[in-house]
Amino acid sequence: MTKSLNKLLFIVYLAVCLPVMGQDTFADNFGSVSYSNNDGNQSWSTNWLEYNDNNSASNGYIRITGGELFLYYLWNENIRRSADLSGYSAATLTFDWRTSSLESGETLSIQVSSDGSSFTTLDTFSGSQTGSFSQDISAYMSANTTIRFIKGGGNWSGNNDRAYIDNVLITATSVPSIDTDGDGAIDVVDLDDDNDGITDEEEYCSTVSASFLASSNVGERNVVINHTDTGYLRIDFSSMDNSFQLDINGNTVHPSILEFENGALDAGDEYFVFQSDGSFISQPWVANSNGIPRLRLIVDEYGEISLYGSRNTSSTSLELMEAQGGTPFNTIAWIPGNNNTFTLTNQQGPGPEGFTGELFASAICDTDGDGISNHLDLDSDNDGIFDLVESGALEESGVNDNNNDGRIDGAVSSSGANGIYSGIEDNDTAYALLTYTIFDSNSDGTYDAYTLDADGDGCADVVESGFTDNNDDGLLGPNPVTINSEGMVTSGSDGYSTPNDNDSNSTFDYREVGTAPMITSQPVDVTTCPGCTTSISAIVTADQFQWQYYNGSSWVNLSDTGIYFGTSTNVLTITNPTPNEHNTPYRLLASNDAFVCGATTSNTATLTLQVNTVITNRRITYRVNKN
């Protein structure tokens, strides 16, 4: 009896809450005839295993052919594969299927097991049909979660009894317990995951703005905002009149509409109250007098949602809110690189509707493209200067990095529940604000930590700091750049020390706009006689001067020796020149201490020696040929 195998594409996709985008994939695209393919970013815990067949991917009752897995004329044969789903909080299995000529009593079953031996049937497929399957398999998550395809009824009796499976997807979610900086606050609640003094939100990039709805009694309205590659969302409502729902890519943030006015509950609404005492927000439709938002909703990089509110119009703080009935928020699955659509809906109620505020949407940013996101990268632009230094946090009293590791000293023990060092925040809450202003030296909207020329003077930060840039690309060291797990360049010969302040004005040169000197009066040719004294000068404002002469093949620096004086000033004095200096070209190099990227070179001035045409000695006068 012969059986042929045509196709099974089996992709297991785990939406794991990891620090980057909350996703892992266990996949098999069946691109090669092998049961050990691992096409995702994680490996399966086993190969595909056949039972009661020959366990060959190229022939038998079950096999890979034409880039697909095909099940044919099944009696006792089945195929299974396992993945480690331990540590996750939820998982869903989906796939597409089609069957051909499965008569009454002949079915294909999809089964799942938490131990690899005791299986539960999730569904069966029969006839000649196509469809899509989706089911929660959270109850079967373990270190040995196994899925199996097997006949579900009687033996498949005909040679044309076949089944095909495609696009299998397991989406698993969890909240990780990673604490990158070791400060006791896991990354999911830590507002500064690497203790570099810049909050994670500030280390994200790419924002959008939205026009919200003025209050008006005109019925239900919505606002639609699009943003590419979102990994973090914050919405601050300055007023709310009086309910809303947020839909992200077709998924609502909560099963119910969020209602904030006591006594205004409609069908499909759920009251949201302060978690501490269950009380309602007072007059959510009136803006706060001190600028604090009435409501703040955050969807973090793990898809976890939190909501805060200010109790009344004079509140000075935000407090955690929750659904009165205890219904939790949904979890949002951010998808890297995709367009995301946010739909804010203000439902029709007994009075006016509307909301005002601002929306902040961001990608999880990796400025230097080294594979480590800014919120975990201690040098986010690979210029050899720690983000902690470029942030300006070290300018604050009591903030130090004496061990030069790119993290605030004492942050491990003094960061509080929200993970921000207490010396640079206003309070230990999930909405804390920094008490200092992050440096943006040239005010171009990009923080110094994420640009290679912080002051915009055309001189790279790495060079102005006194570090080595082997190929003038603005990055520390040679190309290609190699880094360690914390985002620090390891291929450079220096870096990560105190940047230069060549003019000693207490501002690092890379933060201070520098320019090459401008010469307002150029040196001119001079003529003098042997044994006489003359000078060559230029008018220029600069910090450093260097006179040079041309020896016939190259320019050579002069020093205050022999016939020369003032070689490091703007006036070169030449005393008692000899015929050797006749027709010698001279020039001036001028530079500024805070700008190491270039000096200004003057025009050339030539010294000509000429004897006097009239010589008087003992009252006798001689006229000589001047040449």
Image (cartoon, rainbow, N blue to C red):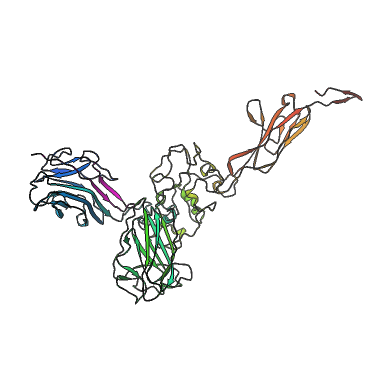
Q: Which residue appears at 74% of the width and 25% of the height?
A: 578
Report if residue 18 lies within the magenta region.
yes
Q: Which residue appears at 72% of the width and 24% of the height?
A: 580
Q: Is residue 378 left or right of residue 459?
A: left
Residue 574 visible in image: yes
Q: Is residue 18 left or right of residue 105?
A: right
Rendered position, 388 above or below 537: below
Q: Closest to the observer: 569 or 46? A: 46
Report if residue 210 lies within the magenta region.
no
Q: Closest to the observer: 545 or 224? A: 224
Task: Specify start and end residues of the magenta stretch as a single range.
Answer: 1-30
Q: Closest to the observer: 98 or 344? A: 98
Rendered position, 612 above or below 282: above
Q: Is residue 34 left or right of residue 609?
A: left
**Main secondary structure found in the magenta portion:** loop
Count of marks, rendered view? 0
Q: Which residue appears at 12% of the width and 46% of the height?
A: 161
Residue 554: image quadrant is top right
